[in-house]
Amino acid sequence: MFVDSHCHLDRIDLAPYQNQFADFVADARQQQIEHMLCIGIDLEVFPAMRALVAPYDDISLSVGVHPNVTDGREPSVDDLLALAQDAKVIAIGETGLDYFHSQGDVEWQHRRFRTHIQVAKILQKPLIIHTRNAGHDSLDVLREAGADQVGGIIHCFTEDWAYAEKALDLGFYIAFSGIVTFKNAHTIKDVAQRVPSDRFLIETDSPYLAPMPHRGKPNYPTYVRYVAEHIAELRNTSVETIAQQSRDNFYRLFALN
């Protein structure tokens, strides 16, 4: 059984499922997807996302505002606290820093990031971290703001082993997406071989970043199997072992039964 630790279920293409979300969930279960963490990226869409997944005990939520989101309401501590009290919400984010899409003064991203960390610490819920072209600044903020008190996930990991060691030291887990299956992703493959068996997760980030052999096409949580298969090959073990280890790590991190 597989856990997809990061997906955007309100954004996937439901055309293959007759535009029925229930049909998608049924198919995911049939393909051994045991649990999915649906990630929030803005405040305005969260209520509809919450309603979409409400009937399903095997889908959890995070709440947060993505560092690339520049329209809509800026999240306050009170905003995030109010939404994160929901029993479905097990994580805060995704949050972090992204210098690839933002130019000039990015102090607003730092303030937003620190707001999320403050909420995570108040509620003692793990963080979902997005970092792009801002790796060391992201670690600095996590360290300075005391994010080690709650830990969380460095989602869609794209850094090197030295970076991974620093993230692990802060209590964070390393999550591998479909990128690890790409032929030229040598640095990420190296990390996937080295990361301790009790500190990694697998994810799809669907509908984005489809793994091989579906690269460039819409992604689905069912494709998390390809990520597990590739990591199993890298670590010279079975896909069942990778599925079980990542599953156990997910439930431990989020204190789920």
Image (cartoon, rainbow, N blue to C red):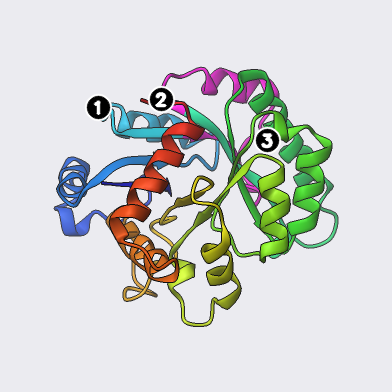
Q: What stretch is highlighted in magenta?
A: 62-89
Residue 151 % position (x, y): 64, 36
Q: In this view, does 69 lie to the left or right of 111?
A: left
Q: Which of marks 2 and 3 is nearer the N terminus?
A: 3
Quadrant the C terminus occupies: top left
Q: Residue furthest bottom?
A: 184
Q: Is residue 97 above or below residue 76?
A: below
Residue to which mark 2 is pinned: 88
Q: Distance between the residues labelled 1 and 2?
A: 11 Å
Amino acid type, residue under disc 3 in the picture: Glu
Q: Earlier in the sequence, mark 3 or mark 1?
A: 1
Q: How crowded is mark 3: few (under 14 residues within 10 Å), some or many (20 or more)?
A: few
* C-beta proximity under 8 Å, tags 3 and 1: no
Q: Which of 153 and 83 is in front in this view?
A: 153
Q: What element carries label 3?
A: loop
Q: Nearer the viewer, residue 154 or 116?
A: 154
Residue 54, quarter of picture: top left
Amino acid type, residue under disc 1 in the picture: Pro
Q: How crowded is mark 2: few (under 14 residues within 10 Å), some or many (20 or more)?
A: many
Q: Distance between the residues labelled 3 and 1?
A: 29 Å
Q: Nearer the viewer, residue 124 or 12?
A: 124
Q: What element carries label 1?
A: loop
Q: Nearer the viewer, mark 3 or mark 1?
A: 1
Q: Nearer the viewer, mark 2 or mark 3?
A: 2
Residue to which mark 3 is pinned: 74
In the rendered structure, find residue 142 and report the number of the disc placed on it. Answer: none
Q: Is residue 24 left or right of residue 139?
A: left
Residue to which mark 1 is pinned: 55
